[in-house]
Amino acid sequence: MPKNESKKSIEAKIKSLDQSVEWFYSENFSLDQALQKYQDANQLAQEIQQDLSALKNQVEVIADFTQSE
């Protein structure tokens, strides 16, 4: 199994982050849970940024390779 299949896709992470953000605007909002939800969302946002950075690096390598041919 490829390495990427064992992890959530970027799209799935973004969807999960969107749901977390929506929670803050919902009727289910609770100050007692807000700190943990914020920390979880922040961690997820950092993971997305790292995934996107890695993906950008892969695209740049491919682009450099194709330009050198």
Image (tube, helix red, strand yellow):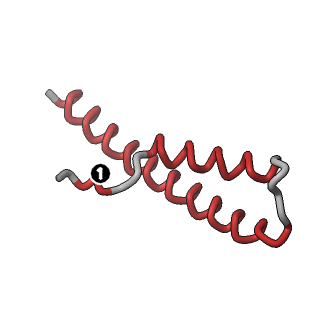
Q: Residue furthest left?
A: 69
* Position in image of residue 29 (x %, y %): 82, 57
Q: How many marks?
A: 1
* Position in image of residue 13 (x %, y %): 51, 49
* Position in image of residue 30 (x %, y %): 83, 63
* Quadrant of the rendered image containing residue 62: top left
| Residue 14 drawn above or below residue 36 | above
Q: Amino acid at mark 1?
A: Asn
Q: Residue at x 59, y 55 (%)?
A: 45
Q: Nearer the viewer, residue 21 or 33?
A: 33
Per the image, the residue denoted by label 1 is 4
* Relative to 33, 43 lies left or right: left
Q: Residue at x 76, y 69 (%)?
A: 33
* Relative to 35, 18 lies left or right: left
> Badge 1: few (under 14), some or many (20 or more) residues near its Cα, within 10 Å?
few
| Residue 66 drawn above or below residue 17 | above
* Relative to 28, 11 lies left or right: left
Q: SS at mark 1?
A: helix
Which image quarter is the C terminus in?
A: top left
* Position in image of residue 25 (x %, y %): 82, 47
Q: Residue at x 80, y 55 (%)?
A: 28
* Quadrant of the rendered image containing residue 63: top left
